[in-house]
Amino acid sequence: MRYLVIASMLSMLTGCGTTPSFEHLNVGSPTDGAHLYVFRPKIDGSGQLTTPQLLVDGVRVAGLGREQFTILSLAPGRYTLKLEDRAPSGHWNATAEIELASGRSHFVAIWNQAQITNPGTTLPLQLPSGVVLPITLGATRSAGRVVFEVAAEDVGRDAVSQLRYVHPDAHRVESIRASRP
C-alpha cells in the first residue's frame, strides 16, 4: 500500500512540470525558415516508458517520451530524421527523410507499429517482502516497426496541443542550421 501511495504522489508531481502548453509557446509562423514539429501521438500506446533520441542529420536534438513533442526551427531543405533507442531491443530505431519548405510548419508523428492488441489479465503477485507486483499474463503485441508520418498542419496542431513540450538542445539545433548554406 505504501508503494501505491508513493507512486500516486509521483504521478501527480510529473503533471506539475514547467513545460509550457502548446498555446503558451508562442512559436508564430516561420519567416526565414521552417518549423519542424516532431511528436509521439497520445493514442500511441506502445513504449510508454521509452524515450528514444531524435537525431536530425546525425545530430542528437531531443529525447521524445510518450505524449511529447519538440519544435525545431530550421532552414528549408532536405533533412534526415533518425530515432535511436538505447534499449537492447532497438524497437524504436527508425530513419526517414523530410523536405522542409520555407515559411511553413511541418508536423511529423512517430508511430510504433507494435501496439498492444490484447491487454491480457493482470494478477497481483506478493513477494516475501510484502511488496505486491502486478503481473500481466496473456498480453500480446502486433508485430511492427517505427514509422515517421507527415501529418497535415491542422491535424498536427491538434495533436501537439494535447502533448507535453520537450525543449530541444539549442546548441545542437544551431549546429544543424550552421551546416546549411
Image (cartoon, helix red, strand yellow):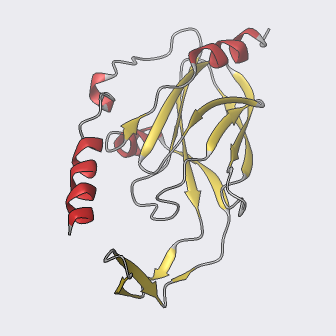
Q: Is residue 87 above or below residue 113?
A: above
Residue in the image at 49% along x and 91% along y: 138
Q: Quadrant of residue 35?
A: top right
Q: On the picture, is 44 further left or further right than 55?
A: left
Residue 13 shows in this picture = yes
Q: On the picture, is 144 further left or further right than 154?
A: right
Residue in the image at 45% along x and 51% along y: 66
Q: Quadrant of the C terminus?
A: top right
Q: Is residue 122 above or below residue 43?
A: below
Coordinates of residue 127 in the picture (x, y in percent)? 39, 81
Coordinates of residue 112 in the picture (x, y in percent)? 58, 61
Coordinates of residue 87 in the picture (x, y in percent)? 67, 56
Instruction: Report the label total.
Output: 0
Q: Quadrant of the N terminus?
A: bottom left
Residue in the image at 19% along x and 60% along y: 5
Q: Quadrant of residue 72?
A: top right
Residue in the image at 31% along x and 27% along y: 20
- Viewer-closest of 96 and 59: 59
Q: Residue furthest front?
A: 129
Coordinates of residue 130 in the picture (x, y in percent)? 31, 77
